[in-house]
Image (cartoon, rainbow, N blue to C red):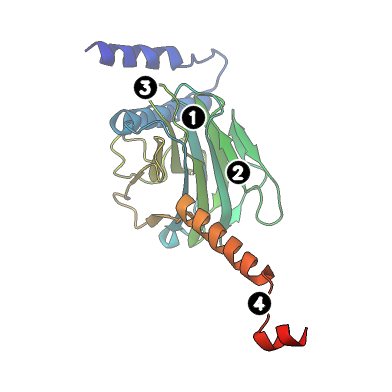
Amino acid sequence: MRVRNCQRLRVRKLWRPIGSGQTASTLSSLRRRKLRWLGSLSLLLSLSSGPTVAGATALQFVLDTTSLSGVTATLALDLIGNDGGTGNNTVTISDFYTDGALDLTGSSIVNGVTVTTPSPPGPFPVILADTDLFNEFLQPLALGTTLRFTLNLTERRATGMFSDAFSFFLLNGAATLPLFATDDPTGAGALFQVDIDGTAGGGLSSFNALQANVTWTVTAVPLPSTAWLLGAGVLGGLAARRRTRPTPLSRREKGQG
């Protein structure tokens, strides 16, 4: 009971007040943003149990949006910095592709986000850092038939009670509501979440659409292990040494000398 009360107190302290001059649409957007934050926090409470080690995770995300082709939507990439450490984890979204159309003038960032603007596809790669509790990148687009990207996460668990987490959402064009419902147990509508719990691979939770005919996959990209890299280095060194070793003279060559 004491732990639960501490969690509620933590949420109250982190709940940002709403200013009196904000519009109704702004209030709705803030409420939805808080819902996504609370959803990520709720899932973290059930997943945060990893050891304090450092590693890395690489994931490939592929989304089939054939049934939603032409629909205006918003990609929401959220990094919750909740492990008590600041700047100890980053999430990089790269190798981005869609046959839809990105709105390159409508993207927005909250707190620890760095974007680049190559052409095409711009603005990816995007790097999110846990410099604040809530770090978010929003990218509006007109959906095509497919969307994919690679996700690279560090896995550094701080000493706090909770862990950092990355979540991916597909919102409507106004970025106020999920484009469709998923079986995310928090009700926030995430497509997937990765709990940065300090383990190689992290705590991945992939969800499913409840009604829309939309499917996606999140698969791990194998990373070379330390043992494999060390073994390859040793074998390479032995091969180089063998190539440079002088060839022994035969008996006839010695006699001629």
For the residues bearing labels 2 and 1, Cβ distance under 8 angstroms: no
Residue 72: x and y, percent?
A: 52, 50
Q: Residue at x 69, y 69 (%)?
A: 244
Residue 216: x and y, percent?
A: 39, 56
**Mark 4 highlights which residue?**
248
| Quadrant placement of the C terminus | bottom right
Sequence-first disc among 1 and 4: 1
**Real-space CA distance between mark 3 and mark 2, rounded to the nearest whole angstrom:** 28 Å
Q: Nearer the viewer, mark 1 or mark 4?
A: 4
- Position of residue 32 in the picture relative to residue 111 (left or right): left
**Numbered label attached to residue 247:** none
Q: Residue at x 31, y 50 (%)?
A: 208
Q: Nearer the viewer, mark 2 or mark 1?
A: 2
Q: Nearer the viewer, mark 4 or mark 2?
A: 4
**Real-space CA distance between mark 1 and mark 4, rounded to the nearest whole angstrom:** 78 Å
Type of residue at label 3?
A: Met
Q: Using the rendered view, name the quadrant where residue 6 is placed.
A: top left
Residue 233: x and y, percent?
A: 56, 58
What SS does tag 1 mark?
helix
Q: Residues within 10 Å of mark 3 (few under 14, many from 20)?
A: few
**Real-space CA distance between mark 2 and mark 1, rounded to the nearest whole angstrom:** 22 Å
**Numbered label attached to residue 29:** 1
Sequence-first disc among 3 and 2: 2
Sequence-first disc among 2 and 1: 1
- Position of residue 232 in the picture relative to residue 165 (left or right): right
**Real-space CA distance between mark 4 and mark 2, rounded to the nearest whole angstrom:** 57 Å
Q: Nearer the viewer, mark 3 or mark 2?
A: 3
Type of residue at label 1?
A: Ser
**Mark 2 highlights which residue?**
126
